[in-house]
Image: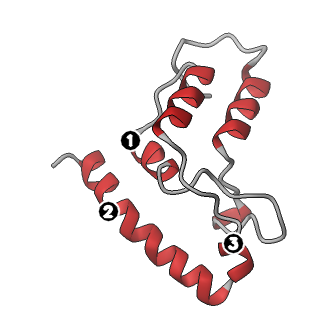
Amino acid sequence: MSSDADAVERLPAAWGRVEAWLRAHAPASAALLRPAASAADIATAEAAMGVEFPATLAAWYRIHDGVGEGHGAGFLPSDTVMLPLEEMADEYRTHVQDWEREEGLLP
């Protein structure tokens, strides 16, 4: 099994542990996890950005379409927030609108 396929296979269990910890220790943050994104949602975001997501990123979005807004939304390391797909595509367009770049590369 390739390392990407292995990581994709392990992701649901790993996030299950994160979610269990959040429910026990930070229920407000756990409540901010959005439902899964559909394959169509992921494809729409990829098309909007002109990229194909790495397998592990697409797999994460199939578990949760990011994190909703609210106090405690930045519970990931360095206070990082996993944006919902639609917001990520908007942010991406904002950041690259004036950039010349090779097609398909994420800045």
The quadrant the C terminus occupies is top right
Which amino acid, by three-letter code, is at mark 2? Arg
Q: Earlier in the sequence, mark 1 or mark 3?
A: 3
Q: Nearer the viewer, mark 1 or mark 3?
A: 3
Judging by the rendered image, the residue that carries numbered circle 3 is 31
Residue 10: image location, x then y, percent: 32, 62
Q: Residue at x 69, y 37 (%)?
A: 86
Earlier along the polypeptide chain: callout 2 or callout 1? 2
Q: Which residue is at the far bottom?
A: 24
Q: Amino acid at mark 1?
A: Ala
Q: Which residue is mark 2?
A: 10
For label 1, the residue is 55
Gap in angstroms between the C-alphas marked 2 and 1: 12 Å
Instruction: Check the image and name the residue furthest to the left.
Output: 1
Q: CA distance from mark 3 to mark 2?
A: 23 Å
CA neighbours of label 1 inside 10 A, class few (<14), some (14 to 19), many (20+): few
Residue 2 versus residue 29 in the image, above or below: above
Report the front residue among 34 and 97.
34
Local secondary structure at mark 1: helix
Q: Secondary structure at mark 2?
A: helix
Is there a contact, CB below 8 Å, between mark 3 and mark 2? no
Extreme right residue here? 71
Cβ atoms under marks 2 and 1 closer than 8 Å: no
What element does badge 3 sit on? loop
Residue 74 on image: x %, y %: 74, 64
Where residue 96 appears, as percent x and y from the top left, is 72, 21
x 76%, y 27%: residue:
95
Residue type marked 3: Ala
